[in-house]
Amino acid sequence: MSFLTEHASVIAWGAFSLIIFIALKGLKDQGGDFKYIKDWSSRESWKGEVKEASLISWNQTKTMNNVDYYFIFKFEMTGGDIGDYYQAAAVVKVSDVSKLHKGMKIHVKVDGMPPKKTAVLYEDYQS
């Protein structure tokens, strides 16, 4: 028992440091998705070129836009170098989630090459 009383301040500072570390680590992990969602939300305010792309994969985020979810799309630009994959946020209606498929054509707004900002403007579910 004397060990705890003698080293209480060291144990308290260690526990405090661990809590701060875990909290900051959690914020850092959410940063990637947040950047893409921020780019999508501000897509009307930044200049960019609209390009056609082919969908490679998609991940649903926990963030919602009204009743629809944000997704992070991984895609390859049509006519670009093979192997150059990019990511962008998209809002997908709940009724359209089952229509997502690999190779689907999407239209993406990009700012520069390689893009500094990206946002999915339109999904072509028929392709």
Image (cartoon, grey):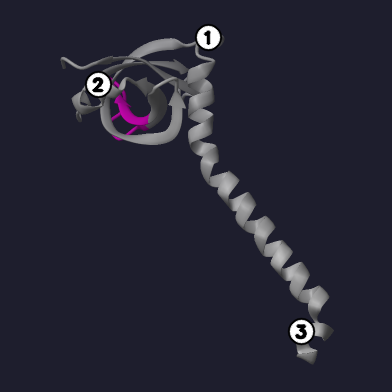
Q: For residue 115, which numbered disc appears in the image? A: none
Q: CA distance from mark 3 to mark 1?
A: 60 Å
Q: Amino acid at mark 3?
A: Leu
Q: Amino acid at mark 2?
A: Asp
Q: Badge 3: few (under 14), some or many (20 or more) residues near its Cα, within 10 Å?
A: few
Residues drawn in magenta: 72-85
Going 16% across and 14% down the picture, which residue do you hit? Answer: 126
Front residue of this view, candidates 9 and 75: 9
Q: Earlier in the sequence, mark 3 or mark 1?
A: 3
Q: Earlier in the sequence, mark 1 or mark 2?
A: 1
Q: Which residue corresponds to mark 2? A: 96
Going 19% across and 28% down the picture, which residue do you hit? Answer: 101
Quadrant placement of the N terminus: bottom right
Report if the CB atoms under discs 3 and 2 are less than 8 Å apart.
Answer: no
Q: Position of residue 20 (x, y in %)?
A: 68, 56
Q: Position of residue 4 (x, y in %)?
A: 76, 84
Q: Earlier in the sequence, mark 3 or mark 2?
A: 3
When asked about the image quadrant of residue 91, the answer is: top left
Q: Is residue 127 left or right of residue 34?
A: left
Q: Position of residue 9 (x, y in %)?
A: 82, 74
Q: Amino acid at mark 1?
A: Lys
Q: For residue 47, which numbered disc appears in the image? A: 1
When asked about the image quadrant of residue 108, the answer is: top left
Q: For residue 4, which numbered disc appears in the image? A: 3
Q: Secondary structure at mark 2?
A: helix
Front residue of this view, candidates 104 and 13: 13
